[in-house]
Amino acid sequence: MSNSSSITQFLLLPFADTRELQLLHFGLFLGIYLAALLGNGLIITTIACDQHLHTPMYFFLLNLSLLDLGSISTTLPKSMANSLWSTKAISFLGCAAQVFVFLFFISAEYYLLTIMSYDRYVAICKPLHYRTLLGSRACVHMAAAAWATGFLYALLHTANTFSLPLCKGNAVDQFFCEIPQILKISCSNSYLTEIRLLVVSACLGFMCFVFIVVSYVQIFRAVLRIPSEQGRHKAFATCLPHLAVVSLFISTAMFTYLKPPSISSSSLDLVVCVLYSVVPPAVNPLIYSMRNQELKGALWKLIS
């Protein structure tokens, strides 16, 4: 038995024990990471360079790509290095930094996705007021609020989690440092404060979720009233990618942080964690570019 004052490093969960499977994991994660870097990098460059894309929707999409790059760069490089060098260790400060930075990016991304649903609501349900409600200053303020809220959220949870005494060893049952796994090795009667914080966070997250659902109910009602089929198709083309990203992100993240311990297992936790921390940053550029003709045209123009 040990406590947090004597722990200098944590042991992360390896994906495999044999050298061949470790190298396979390294190659797989390297491919996903490079795809995420390329896709998000192209979106950021295209939006920044094309004047026609300097609109609120693409401004928020640029911020989303930045957050995706940050979140996937927090987890995958360390996991790939551990597989390549056949090690499991991460320092205590490195683990705390990983928890803080990852929480910062994914919480800011969730708030940004909520703002993006408001952007789509105003664009489709109140098009005449779009420039008034979503001017450049308002967009900057909303994006800054998402980043700042994510920072405060991450700071609060990280400080509280790593102030808990750890009495059950230093093995983190995940491929990166994650709060639910660190709570498992804390003293049985000392993690209630963090549980309360997680409940409060879940309530705030649920309010954002309700806001997104209500926004899309109004959006779909407005879209179905559009008389022309081309108009409906264009409206759906701008909304469905955002809805797909939100659905994947929220469902997997909520399952990770709110599932009861009775259905927890190492393999299930690992799969769900990959789904909410690795898959969205890699597939978001593909989702947003598949149905967006304007973005595809600007990207092709930039490449050619």
Image (spheres, helix red, strand yellow):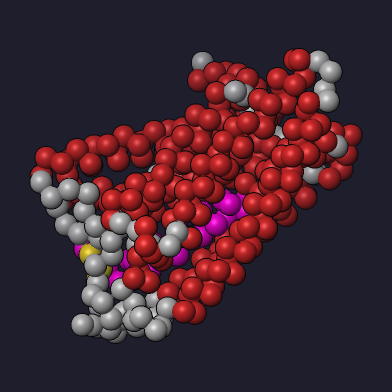
Q: Please report the residue visible at 39 percent of the width from the left and 76 percent of the height from the top.
A: 162
Foreground: 177 or 257?
Answer: 257
Q: Can residue 156 be spotted in the picture? A: no
Q: Please report the residue visible at 64 percent of the width from the left and 52 percent of the height from the top.
A: 209
| Place of residue 92 in the rendered image (x, y in percent of width and height, measured from the top left) | 30, 72
What is the span of residues highlighted in magenta in the rendered image?
89-112
**68 sits left or right of 96 in the view:** right
Name which quarter of the figure residue 244 lies in.
top right
Q: Main SS of the magenta segment? A: helix
Foreground: 273 or 298?
Answer: 273
| Place of residue 21 in the rendered image (x, y in percent of width and height, measured from the top left) | 15, 41
Q: Can residue 60 be spotted in the picture? A: yes
Q: Please report the residue visible at 31 percent of the width from the left and 79 percent of the height from the top.
A: 166
**252 sits left or right of 135 in the view:** left
Report the residue that reaches farthest toward the front: 262
Name which quarter of the figure residue 122 lies in.
top right
Give the quadrant of the N terminus: bottom left
Q: How many marks?
A: 0
Foreground: 84 or 227?
Answer: 227
